[in-house]
Image (spheres, rainbow, N blue to C red):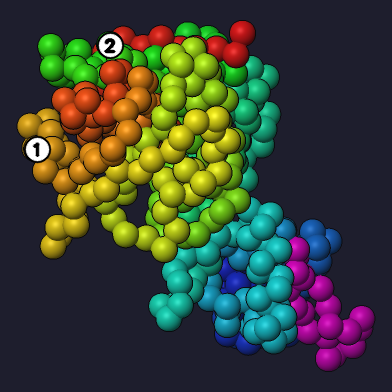
Amino acid sequence: MTGKNEQHKIIVNILLETGVFAISDIENRSILSRESIGKILRELIIDDILKKTVKNGSGVKYKLTINNKAVTFLFEHIEQMSIDDFARVWGISVNSAKKYIKNFIDSDIIKKFGTPPKKIVYTYISQKNNSLFLPEQKEIIEKYYVYTTPEGRLLEGIKGFVYWAEHTSGRKDIENLAQEYVSMREKYYNKKSGVLMIDATDKLQYVFGNEVFIEKLFHRDFDALPVFGKTALSQMVRTAKSGRANRVLMRKIVEKIQESADIIISKYNIDCIAFIPPTVARKTQLMTFIAQQLNIPCEKIFFTKVKNLVPVQQKSLKKIEDRMLNAKKTIIVNDAQKYNNILLIDDVTGSGATLNETAKKIITQNIAKKVYALTITGSAKAGVFDVISEA
């Protein structure tokens, strides 16, 4: 092994084994001369990747510096590291290593996988230069794109886009992907920025024909876009529903839908808000939080859901008939008062079966004359959509 890359790999392996090392440690594993090894080490010192433990003399040893360059150097030759590995290569205690690792995670240099009591490992997040993207691409991606990593962190803008492109898209042409994303947004949002909501009413007739019981159906945003997957708001919802009691994230979701709800209430003279009950029991329910935090100038009511032995989520049912039957059998609509116009609010809507079946019960039981619906996100698969802008 004589190449510089091979010598760097030897140094990384020695760091992982012993932390601090001497030139002799490399000599024992290499056919290079002491002079050649010294040259490589000097280059790494100049690059601020290594540093000497003492200035001169036979007792000179080398250790890894604690900075971004050094971390990048490590992960060029190793896929993942443990907390003990970091403590060893840095020559510090595990507790001290945890503090440095947190800083690198917060700076999106490394990412963590696993939760106790399982083994925790850390891997590297590649950093792409913003110059890869054209000004328009950078503006759109920074403003709208979000990616949720496997461990549940939200990476916004360019960082999230590059992470998704490298780890999920299966493609290497990031520049072309960026332009496709801009074009996709233009197609689905009609070049409008500041979107307040999406009128998806036509989708109901597309799915249910003449059996539609909802006057108007609005989504705050799409659930997902072709190729690029979940939208930023959809990922926020998914993270909020994943069992993590993230109230900061939930408040952001409330802020996103507040203005849309205000417009619907005012325009359609809504006199009651009803919330679709969740299927899966969680310590902190997103819909319960939204009901508590939304500033609504009218009455709020919650419908109930029959608790079966095995809760079945609508998204797990593939056939529209099964979704309609599930909604019909599980949601109970009981209220003694009568209303003119009710607004149903739900988190995510696919086919709209839950909303439509709930609206049918409201109408047939004479609870309200008309039913409107607002969901945080909704499917973009069927129907023609009208994007409602701030302007």
Within 10 Å of disc 2 (Cα), the crowding (few <14, some 14-19, many 20+) is: some
Picture layout, residue 196 above or below residue 9: above
Outermost residue on the right side: it is 55
Quarter location, residue 302: top left
Which circle marks residue 381 in the picture? none
* Marks 2, 1: nearer the viewer: 1
- Residue 346 pos. (x, y %): 36, 36
Give the residue number, with chain letter if any, for mark 2. Answer: 202
**Residue in view at x 75 percent, y 63 percent:** 67
Across and down, in percent, residue 30 comes to: 59, 77
Residue at (13%, 38%) from the top-left corner? 328
Magenta-span inclusion, residue 133: no
Residue identified by numbered label 1: 325
Q: Amino acid at mark 2?
A: Asp
Q: Where does residue 61 sit, x and y in percent of width and height?
A: 78, 84
Give the magenta range.
49-67
Q: Is the magenta region chiefly helix, strand or loop?
A: loop
Q: For this rendering, which residue is in front, 67 or 144?
A: 144
Q: Earlier in the sequence, mark 2 or mark 1?
A: 2
> Label 2, label 1: how many angstroms apart (C-alpha)?
22 Å
Q: Quadrant of the C terminus?
A: top right
Q: Is residue 218 above or below residue 65?
A: above
Contact between labelled residues 1 and 2, with CB atoms less than 8 Å apart:
no
